[in-house]
């Protein structure tokens, strides 16, 4: 994958899961360095067992910025006498390594935002697969992870300072006074702190106010 490609938030979660599993010494004692961010390399590595982490689906929550990501952690090994015990041991160490805080921490360590809300381990499936030369055992752990898509800040023009003036007196029919508000003046310079504090006492106003007509 090109390093210049933009990273979706679900990609960040997947990469964070890989880093989290790679950082478990107990899991490394079972699979070595064979933890991959895709489903292919775990099946093609020469020194099995291997683990592949990959996305199954990503479902937006209606009327929300939340999403539910279904992420598989899949361990593959060749058949042998201790097959079931090995897969159960891998499953145990994956479960011990994964937590919401630890996964969010890896997301931030990778330069992203931790937008995780919750996670749950769903189905854990053990199966057999075969090709012309080998028989394989497969452990699949399905995680459902609820997260928020980051909201990009709107691209608004710079707005550094504003000046306002207002009169909060009640309407008076006898002298025809009325409430009026001074519009925001984006060109105004801020008053010095002391002048701003005493503005109402001395009848001062922000520079160059623009009145709004009623």
Image: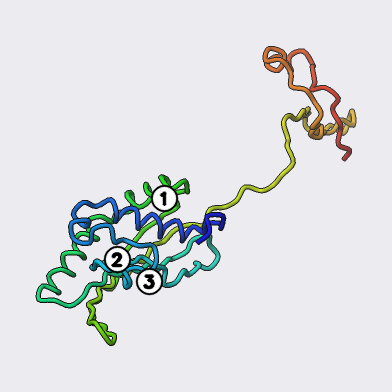
Tell me the CA gap for discs 2 and 1. Answer: 19 Å
The x and y percentages for residue 20 are 31, 53
Q: Which mark is residue 107?
A: 1
Secondary structure of residue under mark 2: strand
Can you name the residue that lies furthest to the left here?
Answer: 81
Classify mark 3: residues with Cα within 10 Å, few (<14), some (14-19) or many (20+): few
User: Tag 1 or tag 2, which sits nearer the N-term?
Assistant: 2
Whole-percent x and y of residue 114? 43, 49
Give the residue displayed 18% in from the left and 70% down from the top.
Answer: 87
Q: Are marks 2 and 3 in contact (CB under 8 Å)?
A: no
Residue 185, relative to residue 116: is it above or below? above
* Residue that label 3 marks: 40
For residue 210, above or below residue 10: above
Cα separation between marks 1 and 3: 23 Å
SS for tag 3?
loop
**Other-residue count near label 1 (Cα within 10 Å), few / some / many at <14 / 14–19 / ≥20:** many
Say above or below: 135 vs 39: below
Mark 2 or mark 3, earlier in chain = 3
Judging by the rendered image, the residue that carries numbered circle 2 is 51
Q: Position of residue 200 (x, y in %)?
A: 74, 18
Among the 4 quarters of the image, the one containing residue 94: bottom left
Q: Residue at x 28, y 50 (%)?
A: 23
Label drawn at residue 167? none
Q: Nearer the viewer, residue 199 or 59?
A: 59
Place residue 141 in its image quadrant.
Answer: bottom left
Q: CA distance from mark 2 to mark 3?
A: 10 Å
Q: Is residue 67 left or right of residue 152?
A: left
Looking at the picture, does residue 58 appear above or below residue 102?
A: below
């Amino acid at each position: 994958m090109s390093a210049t490609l933009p990273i979706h938030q679900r990609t960040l979660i997947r990469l964070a899961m890989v880093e989290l599993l790679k950082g478990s010494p107990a899991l490394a004692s079972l699979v070595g360095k064979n933890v991959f961010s895709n489903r292919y390399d775990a099946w093609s590595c020469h020194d099995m067992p291997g683990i592949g982490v990959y996305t199954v689906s990503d479902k937006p929550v209606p009327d929300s910025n939340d999403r539910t990501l279904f992420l598989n952690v899949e361990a593959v090994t060749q058949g042998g006498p201790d097959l079931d015990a090995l897969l159960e041991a891998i499953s145990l160490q994956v479960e011990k390594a994964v937590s919401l805080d630890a996964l969010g921490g890896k997301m931030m360590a990778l330069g992203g935002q931790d937008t995780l809300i919750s996670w749950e381990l769903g189905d854990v499936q053990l199966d057999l697969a075969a090709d012309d030369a080998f028989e394989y055992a497969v452990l699949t752990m399905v995680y459902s992870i609820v997260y928020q898509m980051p909201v990009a800040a709107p691209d608004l023009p710079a707005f550094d300072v504003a000046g306002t003036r207002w009169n909060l007196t009640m309407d008076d029919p006898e002298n025809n006074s009325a409430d009026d508000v001074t519009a925001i003046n984006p060109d105004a310079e801020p008053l010095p702190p002391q002048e701003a504090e005493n503005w109402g006492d001395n009848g001062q106003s922000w520079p160059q106010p623009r009145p709004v007509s009623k």
